[in-house]
Image (cartoon, helix red, strand yellow):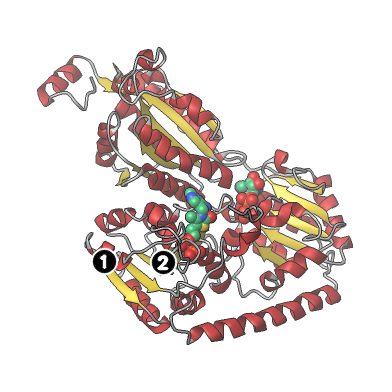
Amino acid sequence: MTIASLGESEASGLVSAQKLTDGIHLVVDALKLNEIDSIYGVVGIPITDLARLAQASGIRFIGFRHESAAGHAAAAAGFLTKKPGICLTVSAPGFLNGLVALANATVNCFPMVQISGSSERHLVDLQRGDYEEMDQLAAARQFAKAAYRVQRAEDIGRGVARAIRTAVSGRPGGVYLDIPAAVLGEVIDAELGAASLWRVVDPAPRQVPEPAALDRAIELLASARRPLVVLGKGAAYAQADDQIRRFVELTGLPYLPMSMAKGLLPDDHPQSVASARSLALRRADVVMLVGARLNWLLGHGDAPQWNADARFIQVDIASTELDSNQPIAAPLVGDVGSVMQALIDRTGPGRIVVPAQWRDELAARSAENVGKMAKRLQAAETAHPMKFLGALQAIRDVLRENPRTYLVNEGANALDLARNTIGMPVPRHRLDSGTWGVMGIGLGYAIAAAVETGDPVVAIEGDSAFGFSGMEMETICRYNLPVVTVVLNNSGVYRGDEGSSSGDPAPTALSARHDLMIAAFGGRGYRATTPTEVAVALREALALGRPALIDCVIDPADGTESGNISHLNPKGITVQR
Ligand code: ADP
Ligand code: TZD
């Protein structure tokens, strides 16, 4: 029995005899002690009272329609704040729904903690068939950075501290914390309970490499003929914007931002070589990776996409990341802020000089590519039915008037084209499908950005991508969040013009009027068929600062299968049947 579930007179009777507390109070107290101020979740047995008490204690509880979206919100909160985002789930199915987000957070290196209630251990472990029976700890372990279970109320403080420390220290990631129903209901002496809680000191300690390691990297950069810096979302997460900018500007190095690192330096910065990406990768002879992995998103560093002789410097908090794909000639293991500061301190003026020939080569290619893109953009401006690029230019123009707007982005074409069309002027304002290219992050990320910052959010969604978390439209409306969802609706996964020889729609076909959907929840719906209508609607929606959805009617024939990763589809043979 929990204190929260006792009648008022019974509870006060207990309290007068001996001051007591219970597992639920201890979880909330431990979170508050560690300055957790929001929880994203879905209630049910055994965590409903926990959510109520958290809310009554001043923690903001955001109740979702599905745990996956709640988990994605927690992950985004972790990325934006460097504190672990907290997701609260019920046993078995709720836990599993949240696990997708926990795994995704771990893959993206975002700190979050999924706290889940679980069923009675003595029933679960003998597989006696309990309500929502499942060995959640074992399931979570393989998908998370770490998984812990609290077995006694007196260990709740330890469990919370351990989960927070693990989530944010070293390479951030997702941590699972299992709290069985019986532990949440366990009643213990209040003084003992209070004494069992602690606050994590310096949860993510700074880490600086040896001077020799710094000099090795500086030497390599100084010897380069065609150097390049690649900034990844680890650099954005580090909140070392000033050090990164100073190092890049001090050295004059050309840099390439990965999608969630856009805005670390404004996208129109003269040293950005985003518009000459392929050339920069293919030709660079010394590459400095800063909080970016040489994974599939960077072609594993392999030739011919990369120069076969390229030498790599890697700045990363996780030493095991180094040498995972290519030899790392100059490892710099540490946090981005400390490493960049140390590099600034040790790089005298004029020590690193970027050869003019390389700068010119990149600038020429950038100009060429910008010219090509301008033609595509111009053609799309007047095209009817509206093209992706028509709608996106309108969005880009309105966002320029609102530079502090957070941008969430998922889909295939909707993702690739928005990333390339919309420049980011400020750091950490772009959140997208990330390392897994996952669909379903959209509204959860948007909700977290709005809740954590109070700033406006625009979520640019493919129509398929939107569907994965679409019901969270109701969550956005219920909490009256300043989120404008823009659905680029080409009536299909990738595109909407595929025919079918069976009586059923094609596997890629979709059909929806999303603007009508938000109306059901009290939000404002718009339908836009031209770029001008998109701009008018978005401007109005942002000015209102209330939940809105703009369904943009896009040509069903616009879009490429799988966007720019078409080549990853397996190519079979044509078999006669
Ligand atoms: P992107 O997809 O943008 O290229 P990745 O997610 O592949 O970026 O890489 C992020 C990297 O940043 C990870 O290897 C992670 O260990 C690292 N990282 C995360 N936080 C920090 C930090 N504070 N300092 C240094 N490296 C970090
Ligand atoms: N399920 C999950 C969880 N993640 C995925 N990435 C996919 C399925 C497969 N997938 C993609 O990789 S993109 C995509 C799916 C279903 C949707 C593309 O269609 P869209 O965007 O309407 O969102 P565009 O703009 O029409 O391409």
Residue 305, placed above or below residue 156: below
Q: How many dots with numbers?
A: 2
Secondary structure state at the residue bearing disc 1: helix
Residue 406, placed above or below residue 237: below
Q: Earlier in the sequence, mark 2 or mark 1?
A: 2
In the foreground, 389 or 402: 389
Tag 2 secondary structure: loop
Is residue 57 found left or right of 553 in the rendered image? Answer: left
Can residue 195 be seen? yes
Give the residue displayed 25% in from the left and 55% down from the top.
478
The picture places residue 507, in percent across and down from the top left corner, at 46, 56
Which corner quadrant holds the N terminus?
top left
Q: Residue at x 37, y 42 (%)?
A: 67
Q: Would you say 377 lies left or right of 96 here?
A: right
User: Is residue 283 found left or right of 197 in the rendered image?
Assistant: right
The mark found on residue 516 in the picture is 1
Q: Residues within 10 Å of mark 1 (few under 14, many from 20)?
A: some
Residue type, label 2: Ser
- Front of the two marks 2 and 1: 2
Q: Is residue 486 above or below residue 382?
A: above
Residue 373 image point, x, y percent: 62, 80
Asked whether 330 or 251 is in front, the reply is 330
- Among the 4 quarters of the image, the one containing residue 289: bottom right
Which class describes the residues within 10 Å of circle 2: few (<14), some (14-19), or many (20+)? Answer: many
Counting from the top left corner in percent of width and height, residue 105 is at: 52, 44
The outermost residue toward the front is 577
Residue at left offset 79%, top offset 56%: 346
